[in-house]
Amino acid sequence: MAVDIPFGLVARGPSGPAPVRRPGSIRRTSTIDMHWPDGPGTQLRLTGRARDLLTPHDGSDPVVVAEDTMTVGVNSATRTIEDIAVDPPRPAATGMIGARGGGSSRTVLAETLPDEAEAGTPLYLMLDDIAGASLVAGFAYSRWVPREQILAAMGNAPRRNMEGICTGFQPGSGALMPDGSSKWNHLVQTVGPLPREDDPTGWHELDEITEISMRRARRIDVTIGDVIEIDSMFQDSSTVPEGGRVAVHEYLVRATADPVTGELLSISADPRVLPYEECPLASLSVDRIVGTSLRELRAAVLEVFPGTGGCTHLNDAMRAMAEVPRLVEALRGRGNRRAHT
């Protein structure tokens, strides 16, 4: 039985460069670039950068409040973390070695680096994203390697049964093959650069990559008025042989929160690029998380939107807002608030 999709519910296309930074705001940006230096099928290398940039009310130069980088080696077959280095150094980060991308890596992260979670650092956002990045990295193969070659390499190995994994792969979805594996007809879209031409500092430094590679990018803008306003973007994109990039996932998520309690007051998800027609259905239920404290989002989202009740990537976009209180503190600490203490 086919899945019912409301009329007009579609991914609306790429949102384009970042919006203009507002005076009295703070912006967190992060990217994880994924590539295979020794060729497809060899160790996956993750290069992560994340930065918090404060834009003062008075029009003075923006201030870098925090900045972190990481490099991680991941076994392509098992998604197991084989090596890791972060800057500024945190010796405890080596405790992530041996964890498997997914639930295991996040459990180990919580145990080995609890102070990073409590502080809501840019590094914590990237380490949490290892799970999703290692999962989506292989999409880049579909842009660079002929399908027949990929199928031949897979041989007779069983295909992963995706049915029930998320909203897009719910029973009856057109995204599923008869054996439960996913179809290859991804609805990708060409995307341009993330920074604005008139505001190159609006994003941290981004590498120009021309070989086979995947990138996970996040932007979170925060301002404080009568409410905390959050404007965020998430995008997964691949390089392509002819140059440029194509996105397979992109969401805009906007929310407001109480400036005193941190309680989520409103939230909306705007699907921009998604691989299957059923995927945007996940955006219809995000308001179920309203009333939750921002700090509790990393755990609460997984409880409220499990399996076909949510989208893995949209869930992570909402979970990333759990560190907004840290950004609010940075704004207030720099005297950028207007109405609230």
Image (tube, grey):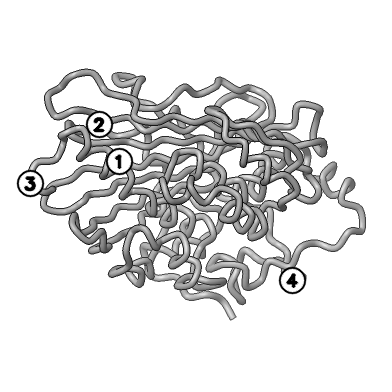
In the picture, measured across the screen, residue 326 lies left or right of residue 259, that is right
> Disc 1 marks which amino acid?
Asp
Q: Is residue 210 above or below residue 229?
A: above
Inter-mark Cα distance, 4 to 3: 57 Å
Task: Give neighbour class at mark 3: few <14, some 14-19, many 20+ (Cα, 10 Å).
Answer: few
Task: Give neighbour class at mark 1: few <14, some 14-19, many 20+ (Cα, 10 Å).
Answer: many
In-front residue for pair 249/26: 26
What residue sits right under mark 2 in the picture?
Answer: 21
Marks 4,3: beta carbons within 8 A: no
* Rendered image: mark on residue 339: 3
Tag nearer the camera, 2 or 4: 2
What residue sits right under mark 1 in the picture?
Answer: 221
Marks 2,3: beta carbons within 8 A: no
Residue beneath the point at 87% across and 51% down = 154
Tag nearer the camera, 3 or 1: 3
Q: Position of residue 123 (x, y in %)?
A: 50, 39
Describe the element under mark 3 as helix, strand or loop. Answer: loop
Task: Please tell me which of labels 2 and 4 falls first in the chain.
Answer: 2
* Rendered image: mark on residue 178: 4
